[in-house]
Amino acid sequence: EYKVAFLWYISCNAALAATAAALCAYISPAAAGSGIPEVKAYLNGVDAPSILAPGTLFVKIVGSVLGVSAGFVLGKEGPMVHTGSCVASLLGQGGSTKYGLTWRWLRYFKNDLDRRDLITCGAAAGVTAAFRAPVGGVLFALEEATSWWRSALLWRTFSTTAVAAMVLRSLIEYCRSGNCGLFGNGGLIMFDVSSQVTSYTAMDLAVVALLGVLGGLLGALFNFLLDRILRTYSYINEKGAPWKIVLTVAISLVTSCCSFGLPWMTTCTPCPPEFSASGRCPTIGRSGNFKAFRCPPGQYNAMASIFLNTNDDAIRNLFSGGTYNEFGVSTLLTFFAAVYSLGLVTYGVAVPSGLFIPVILSGASFGRLLGMLFGAPTGLDTGLFALLGAASFLGGTMRMTVSVCVILLELTNDLVLLPLIMLVLLISKTVADCFNKGVYDQIVRMKGLPYLEVHREPCMRSLVAGDVVSGPLITFSTVERVGTVVDTLRRTSHNGFPVIEDQPFAPAPELCGLVLRSHLLVLLQSRTFTSGRVKTGAAEVFRKLAPFDFAKAGSGKGLTVDDMDLTEEEMDMYVDLHPITNRSPYTVVENMSLAKAAVLFRELGLRHMCVVPRTPGRPPVVGILTRHDFMPEYIRGLYPNVLRE
Amino acid sequence: EYKVAFLWYISCNAALAATAAALCAYISPAAAGSGIPEVKAYLNGVDAPSILAPGTLFVKIVGSVLGVSAGFVLGKEGPMVHTGSCVASLLGQGGSTKYGLTWRWLRYFKNDLDRRDLITCGAAAGVTAAFRAPVGGVLFALEEATSWWRSALLWRTFSTTAVAAMVLRSLIEYCRSGNCGLFGNGGLIMFDVSSQVTSYTAMDLAVVALLGVLGGLLGALFNFLLDRILRTYSYINEKGAPWKIVLTVAISLVTSCCSFGLPWMTTCTPCPPEFSASGRCPTIGRSGNFKAFRCPPGQYNAMASIFLNTNDDAIRNLFSGGTYNEFGVSTLLTFFAAVYSLGLVTYGVAVPSGLFIPVILSGASFGRLLGMLFGAPTGLDTGLFALLGAASFLGGTMRMTVSVCVILLELTNDLVLLPLIMLVLLISKTVADCFNKGVYDQIVRMKGLPYLEVHREPCMRSLVAGDVVSGPLITFSTVERVGTVVDTLRRTSHNGFPVIEDQPFAPAPELCGLVLRSHLLVLLQSRTFTSGRVKTGAAEVFRKLAPFDFAKAGSGKGLTVDDMDLTEEEMDMYVDLHPITNRSPYTVVENMSLAKAAVLFRELGLRHMCVVPRTPGRPPVVGILTRHDFMPEYIRGLYPNVLRE
């Protein structure tokens, strides 16, 4: 009977996993993984296509549901953050301009700043929905997601999560009366452990500090191993979509075998008398603390209670207080080892997968284990040790502090425990920071996204801005031949060009400003050309174009140079770039320290920065700096010796 | 008997008030008021002396204790934030260098950045201590105090408040056993209202929204009236220290009359049966819900329970649940009116005084009043209405959102109420923002501190950087005559000077960099002079001086030009400024939009910004921009017409 069940279990899981992987592999590869690193990179200014596309949103939602259903050791939290960001991005742009799925008033949001703000709010709403933690969502958006923080942003994310919390609260209220079938479970607080502790002693603090140190070490090890595994997987994934599906199904089979096989091999435990009397042990139904898997009445299967269960229920069981002997040391040790390893190998497969749940699960089992081994002299409950273990693992892998602290507070509703959670997080983060970076930073770097770090490389201090300027500089005259502009746009992929004011408009060449590729394309499209080299002025341009025609395109590519179909005569005419030139670009002198130039570039969130010469008598622009010129890898390639200093 | 008590009460209060006012008026005027606006301005870059001096710290602590004891309607929260900042500043600098009260290793903190970080952490620790709210402290520091936010700062404030929370927790634990006499009261959660509510309906939301709107209106009115009253007080305070003391004593007399007289005139209320049975009504002792003031046994004086009580107990009584009829409508209305007015007139007197308590008190009484009037059809307790009323007033006056929300959460330990508190804060802040600015911003502006706002004035868009550069520009040559340097330093009060590389070191004058007054003074002090106009080089200078000799001076004035006693011969020698010149100052071109220059200035936290000419053939620097050049008042004075546009 159980063998048939096992076969059904394993094949259902594999089928769900294969479907999810197929969606990811064929429709939207960007939907695989957590999505938090991608959102983080986007908010840092990396405008990679497809991160927030509607296709990604669809695959993320469906794939996440399939992935969680397939019984993988993965969470829905990361994908929910990504989903929130995608929804925010779509709301800000309307659907696609191509299919007319947008509104006119949305043009106010079609710029980098508002789009970034919206997406930050979306990420905050995602965390709110995932953990039912509105304040935690605000803090997550600030601490982990965003790269630029403004007080307006705090207020905006707060409004978003307040609304999200109200909606969530109403839905919970509505579902509690049984209107939503199986979804009606749980209140606003997911793992209520409140009022289990009233005081703690110095001895408790020592054990908790030990937990923090070990959590930090194991968290850093997790990051290290994850990096290795992801690099290995990337070879497999590069071979094509079928290989991705095969890998996913293989991991699914391993997971199914573990989650079904390990409970199978576990011997049954007699129910604690106080629970069996109340009829709460063993549980036959969906969830509950004591699973009856293959056990006679009056006994329960400890391993099945945490492994052959939903992830949420497993966490709830591990956090549960007053159940000191429910899980034996060997059960916890096996479960910890299995979840830690499965969490590592699952993240890289082609399924939307969050890291929160594996980290919380392994942290909680580890904490509970430590609580059973060392907790006897302390007055703390093993359930609280599980909570502190989860905190220490979160601190050790994700390196977030305030947001994890508040999220755990909102998950468990235990304010008295707050100082202990803060202590554990501090210790585990400090320990883990000695070894490597946070897991999301690591993934961003591994994916090769040009993320601008806050901390400048020390080598930048010994270089100046002029040292890293490269390539032939391409500039335009203020009044330029149309053919030259079109050819240049076709030939290069640059997005910004310095504009030089030259004769007859100025006695000597001087920097007029910076013009963007997207604005040039809009201007060319409007065909505001003159036959001679004369200024047309802004009035002429804005008779044909409205300021909002220059708004940033939503998803999709927007205009490209191949959309232009200009005649030969038009190519020989002139176009006045004055009206669309940014006359006040931020500039640095060529002998400006590269470190200080990097501060300017990052703090102001620039995309292009003009480098001007120090001494007169030379061309008015020496070069242009972009995000890529500040990447340590690039500088390391240019100056291998400087970096070694 | 009560008349004698009243005389004693009023004279003790007046004596305490007079002492506090004398301390403030004669020793440290900077210690009066909340201190949060000053800390805010300091963290924005306003380096006003005496804000964080040891004298201020002393008066702040003693004065705050005296002020609270004198029975004023004021809080200890603002002063505790200021105290935390002062302690942080002192810890970072050591005491004074003059008296040798410093350590050598502290030199690593003697720069603007680390000092600012330390003071932010101090402010966070102050909030933690005041409200026993570690996470609220972090958020307060981020949302209200600091002007620049970095992820490192988040982590640092979090560590600080974690330690503060642990210490607080240990002290509470120690005091609970009765070792601290009267101080042993209360746990980590000051006003525990948990588990009074399980659900709320749309009707509740409507009443709560109304509370938010009214709180916003009354909060904005509070800010408006406070501004008027502070302006009136400033005339009185300018007349000298004795007037300050007279004003303080007068307010003390009014407060004493209200807090003793109003309960006197109140009729007694019979105790609710469930409380009188348990012997908890009326309370004779220090605190408690039902004060027996002038009432026979079995009855209590409602007004005395909130007015003739400590502020903390009054708040606890107002927040208390399940006591629907404890305070009548007329009692609450009278109390609200009295506290609202007394809070307004008390803030400006020469006593360290926080605004949190008056705002919470009037908000709580207003909320409870509204709860009694409208609350009957809702299922919410009047105590919860008091809490929501406090939230709405805090949102309406201080305009903080996330931090107030978390502080209230940590004060009351009621997570289920979180969505309601968020809603109330959102509404009240939005309503109040239509009328005026937050109370701290208003006080900063009223004190004339040059605070750099995030939002640029719209007029800045139509001006360029060159438009606001003023005054004769004072520059130095790279190798300058000592006499010229000393004379210039004596003649002007500028803190930064552009340095020009000229013949014979360069073919044409070019901008070498920027030199600071403090660095010039250290260099002059070291007497690294040459008789001819030659470069000495950095080696020569750093043979005499260590890099840390240029560290920012702590409290006190540091070196001044009057400390220099140079001989006539030395005045005729030359000094090489190359080694101390900042070779990479941030510059803007003179035709850069003023709004964009302001972004650069604020985001990078600059003190000086060089304006360079656009066209060659002119002096290499056009002028220098400082904080004052970006003040709207200054620009308004220069261009009255532009501003009107």
Image: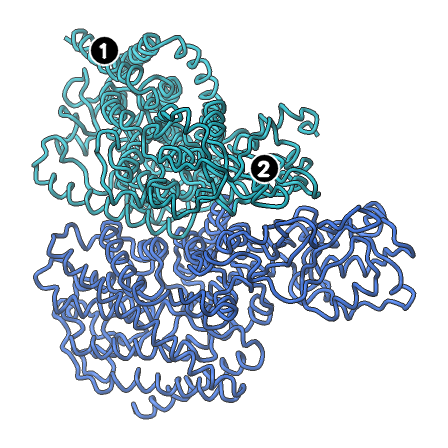
Chain colours: A cyan, B blue
**What is the CA distance from the residue labelled 1 to the residue labelled 2?**
49 Å
Q: In this view, does A448 lie to the left or right of A383?
A: right
- Quadrant in which the N terminus of chain B appears: bottom left
> In the displayed structure, would residue B182 be above or below residue A478?
below
Name the subunit of mark 2.
Answer: A
Q: Is residue A3 left or right of residue A592?
A: left
> In the displayed structure, would residue A427 be above or below residue B335?
above
Q: Nearer the viewer, residue A414 or A359?
A: A359
Residue at the disc numbered 1: A10
Q: Nearer the viewer, residue B164 or B223?
A: B223
Residue at the disc numbered 2: A456
Q: Judging from the image, what secondary structure is the residue with disc 1 in?
A: helix
Residue A50: tell me if it is visible. yes
**Pair 1/2: label in front:** 2
The reply to whether dot 1 and dot 2 touch (C-beta < 8 Å) is no
Q: Do labels 1 and 2 share a chain?
A: yes
Name the kind of residue labelled 2 in the image. Answer: Arg
Name the subunit of mark 1.
Answer: A
Packing grade of label 1 (10 A; few <14, some 14-19, many >=20) is many
Spot occupied by residue A592 in the image (x, y as percentages of width and height): 65, 42
